[in-house]
Amino acid sequence: MTASRPGALSAREDPTDDAPTADAPPEAPEPAPSPTADPGAGTAPRRRVPVDLLVALVYVVGAVFVTGRGWLDPAGRLLGTRPNDQGFNEWMLAYAAHAVTHLENPFFTTLQNAPDGVNLMTNVGMQLPGLLLSPLTLLFGASFSYLFFITANLAGTAYAWYHVLSRHVVGSRAAAFTGGLFCAFAPALISHSNGHPHITAQWLVPFIVWRVVKLSRGGAVLRDGLILGALVSAQFFVGLEILFLAALGCAMGVVALLVVRPREALRRAKPLLGGLAVTGVVVLVVSAYPLWMQFAGPQHRVGHPGTPDAYALKLGSFAAYATESLAGSPTSARGLVANTTEQASFYGWPLLVLFAGIVLWLRRELLVQVLAITGIAFAVLSIGTTWTWGTRRTEVPAPFWLFQDLPIFDSVVVARFALITTAVAGVLLAVAGDRISTVAAGQGPAGRVLTGLAAVAVAAVLLPVAPTPLAVRGREPVPDFVTSGAWREHVAPGRTLVPVPLADMRSLYWSSAGLVGFAVPQGYFLGPVSDDDSTGRWGVAPQPTSTLLLAVSKGERGTEVSSAEREQALADVRHWKADALALPVRYGRQAELRTVLDALYGPGRQVDDVWLWDVRPYTR
């Protein structure tokens, strides 16, 4: 066996035994490092730190490159193509800071969609990032925290994969760097950076996966189970959907191992199951109340709006290029996926050929066999319930058809199964790079030429999927009346301030800017259809007065108000538990809106840069 750094393992050596076995472990971890590709890997551990810092710096620079346009004006710009998703996640960060400072329930609130509220567990959660980012949110605002979060997710996920790969899977840090780079900067996470920080926050996933593998080795089962339990519990409060996908990926890895090496799988089952039992107890204790809230608490939902195939990938998406990729364009993904955030495949033909070549070349390695089966399985699941041809969906059932009605699966955005495929692809790149450096290590100048040619070839294949900077757009300004805190003189804590005209995102932007100090009607969230029907839907049906004011703002109706409409308007502000309605002074058609509001609630008055209607006499 080739010499390696302490702790590294041959590609065919079992880490639980003293000698190599015929049945290698599923992780086939840590082949001998290549002195050509990774000088110093096995000599001076202190030299690793500067290299690791350089790797981290490169990842940070890459992340800032992607999100940089947003940093030019965090409070005035929306990053990416999904402004509503960003607005909701900014609100989630603002609410987390509010919950911390006011000791309120982090899993449910009536401060959005007043008075019925929003079940935060059945939406995106993010309690842990919200808690950690609370100081930034309180100091600089939710828009700054969001931008920091979405940027840090890319760099953090890349480095997490690099760390696990370089310590436990490959000996070449260059190979580990490439793997981490792909896992975070491939089209999957770049597309989800258009408003989905709960999806791009994958910096715990590599450690969770590695700890599952470590459990299967035996040893300190109790200790390792407790460590995994802590990691899983933390990920639970970062993003439950990613935790579910990570669990599915690990389960599929076990199934793949059972298929290719059944005796090896059975040998590892006992310590793995014992450790997972410990993990399960820890997670259950930590998550019992949040899980109750998600599945049985107020405003919980069942399923995801729309059919599974509405958010599934087309088969052709794997050979196409994403909107945000260097070789992509605004139309390159058209017809292949629901929107710009769900482009979780989009590798292009050159990468598909490269991945096929890696699997063919290293087909005898157990690790590659397990990775290949896992990656292909989830690529197939991401197609949805029926197979596709071009941009057309056929009537031929696809594998996800078998799972579509199962609990939890009925809430999954199907395209996101390909996130697992992307992670698998990143690990395959790292393993292949490491094997090339190992082959080249003992061949002198010829080996250096081989390494150089391989590096150029991989760079040429990866370049077309390299990310481009995310687009930005201006955001509707929030009145100084809100941002200055002047609202506090007119709205009691926890009572409702109604923006006029009332729109879902305007409510959230005002609320976020006020650090969720007041409640708002409506909003942007997932909830049940009604009290009697928990089927998932977007938002809530607006109250009649909300519809009336919106029609006036669009010029779709006049300013005449009937007595019935006035009675309804009074009933609606009582329903909202409102203290005031506010109309920005510079809002278009504000004269018509003022006329209608005066007729509904009596004369308003100007306070700072809004017209204000005090409705406390009607609602208290």
Image (cartoon, grey):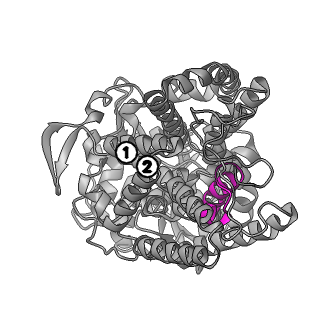
Q: Are marks 2 and 1 in contact (CB under 8 Å)?
A: yes
Looking at the rendering, the stretch of residues picked out in magenta corresponds to: 154-177
The one nearer the camera, 587 or 330, is: 330
| Crowdedness near tag 1: few (<14), some (14–19) or many (≥20) residues, C-alpha within 10 Å | some
- Residue at figure coordinates x 69%, y 23% from the top left: 285
Q: Mark 1 highlights which residue? A: 376
Q: Mark 2 highlights which residue? A: 421
The one nearer the camera, 590 or 145, is: 145
- Residue at figure coordinates x 28%, y 45% from the top left: 383
Q: What element carries label 1?
A: helix
Residue 90 percent coordinates (x, y): 56, 58
Type of amino acid under label 1: Ile
Q: Does the magenta stretch include residue 157?
A: yes
- Residue at figure coordinates x 49%, y 38% from the top left: 249
Residue 488 percent coordinates (x, y): 67, 57
Type of amino acid under label 2: Thr
Q: Is mark 2 on a helix, strand or loop?
A: helix
The one nearer the camera, 541 or 606, is: 541
Q: Does the magenta stretch include residue 161?
A: yes
Residue 204 percent coordinates (x, y): 65, 47
Query: Does 31 sit above or below residue 232?
Result: below
Query: Does 405 sit above or below residue 245?
Result: above
| Whether residue 342 can be seen here | no
